[in-house]
Amino acid sequence: MNIIMASIDHTTAPIELREKLSFTKLSIRTIVGEIKKQSGILGVVLLCTCNRTEIYLSSERQNIDPVQILCGKADINDTTIMNMFVIKKDEAATHHLMEVACGLRSMILGEDQIISQVKDAAVLAREEKVIDPVLETLFRLCVTAGKKVRSQVRIKAVSTSVAQQAVNLLSEHIGGLSDIKALVIGNGEIGRLCAGKLVEAGCSVTMTLRTYKHGQTIIPDGCKTIEYDKRSILLSSVDVVFSATTSPHHTLTYEMMSQLKTRPSYIFDLAVPRDVDPQIEKINTVRCFNIDTIGKTAPVDNNQEIKLANELIDEYAQRFFHWIDYRKSQQVIRHR
């Protein structure tokens, strides 16, 4: 079937290297279009999340190097980074994507958001007309498998999302969140999820907004708002900051924090590339967490749940392989 994929994720590379291969949705649209034009490539899907960047190719050729293709689009020729990729083909690539969609390869086992991220990657490829029937069918079955696993397998995890894990981690350090003042930078899906969890825990939450569009901008119940450009005003009066944006620039800089007489005690950076200037970690009075340190949890015995999930994955993988065999037989019949 000539499917080949390359993956770099939290198990193979630290965040400072992964963020070099983190792409915005706008840049992904350009990249997949350019890749599709290359000789022998029939379809391409690029999956980019906080913890992973993966490229899936359907091709007429066997000698395609997905790492070279992807790193070329990120202007990377560092062999150290290139050697951190995992490459898989055909059946192995199929099983890998199904495990990803089912949350078995997430930093937080069974996390909620990965299914929609896999689906959105295929939707974007479809909109750019770069997905072929093979990858279209593969991603559709992977999303279906992910939903099946989510509905039938109860993973005994600490949290179901990075946002929830970050809030839990803050609670562990402080000993309760009632009356804690929090600033959430970013009004995207992760920022809203963080804000909602903080409000539920009893925090006083202010969220930044770049723009407000009536009927389009969603503000979680119980949250106050402030213009993004005025975020520094609140830094001296909050206990904790959560930052979750897609900004190419740091939302919190060392210069911004070092000038304050009173600072937040905790900063949680849920973005890749990182929102928070790593130099801030040098400030003794501030405890910083990034996506990697947030995701580290105590091990939980989920062996039986993982076994059940893998049985469901095998079922959907076989559906895909049967579809491939049927497609090949139809092609043979048409050429006779």
Image (tube, rainbow, N blue to C red):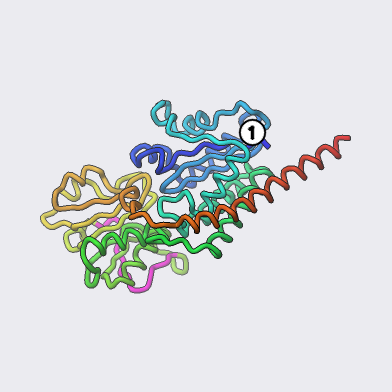
Please give the name of the residue rendered at 39% of the width and 63% of the height, measured from the top-left corner. 193
Q: Residues within 10 Å of mark 1 (few under 14, many from 20)?
A: some
Q: Is 321 placed above or below 170 here?
A: above
Residue 279, image x, y percentages:
21, 42
Q: Amino acid at mark 1?
A: Ile
Say which quarter of the image contains residue 309. Answer: bottom right
Taking the image as shown, residue 244 lies to the left or right of residue 320, namely: left
Residue 254 in percent (x, y) is at 20, 45
230 in magenta: yes
Mark 1 element type: strand
How many marks the image carries: the answer is: 1
**Residue 16: x, y in percent?**
33, 39
Q: Picture coordinates of residue 218 (x, y %)?
A: 42, 66
Residue 256 is covered by the magenta coloring = no
Q: 14 and 268: which one is in front?
A: 14
Query: Residue 257 or 167: which is nearer the viewer?
Result: 167
Pick the residue in front: 174 or 301.
301
- Residues rendered magenta in the picture: 217-231
User: Residue visible at 36% across and 68% down?
Assistant: 196
Q: Choose top left, top right, bottom left or bottom right for residue 191.
A: bottom left
Does any portion of residue 211 appear in the rendered image? no
Q: Which residue is mark 1?
A: 41
Left or right of residue 203, residue 330 in this image: right
Residue reaching furthest right? 336
Evaluate whether residue 79 shows in this view. yes
Which quarter of the rendered picture does the C terminus lie within?
Answer: top right
